Image (tube, grey):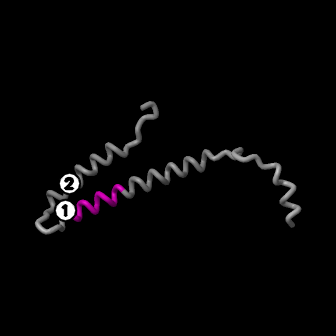
Amino acid sequence: MAGAHSEHKDAYEHGSMDVTEQVKTFKLFAGLMTWNAYAFAIIVLFLTVWFMPGGSFLPALISAAVAAAAGWWFLRRKPAGH
């Protein structure tokens, strides 16, 4: 059984496989996880400010909106030339 595999060991060249689909999938996954984590952080911020002692809905909404706008600005996809 080992003989059947050993005859093909020289046929493989390290780094010769096309990995463009894997790279695109990883970038998509990383982007989705980044935005999901940020959305979770905004929700936690909103609920924390709303339900803290002395907190209310309007300050929670304002702080979440400001953080969401700042996050969108910093996490958005930048053009390739910049």
Q: Crowdedness of circle 1 by 10 Å Cα count: few (<14), some, many (20+)?
A: many
Tag 2 and tag 1, C-beta contact below 8 Å: yes
Image point (67%, 45%), residue name: 18
Residue 46, magenta (yes or no) = yes
Image point (78%, 49%), residue name: 12
Q: Quadrant of residue 52?
A: bottom left
Amino acid under label 2? Ser
Quadrant where the image shows the C terminus: top left
Look at mark 2 in the image and give the residue it sits on: 63
Residue 35's x, y, as percent?
39, 53
Number of numbered discs visible in the structure rendering: 2
Q: Which residues are magenta?
A: 38-48
Residue 43's x, y, as percent?
28, 61
Look at mark 1 in the image and give the residue it sits on: 49
Residue 6's x, y, as percent?
85, 58
Quadrant where the image shows the N terminus: bottom right
Residue nearest the viewer, comparing 56 with 14: 14
Q: Quadrant of residue 58?
A: bottom left
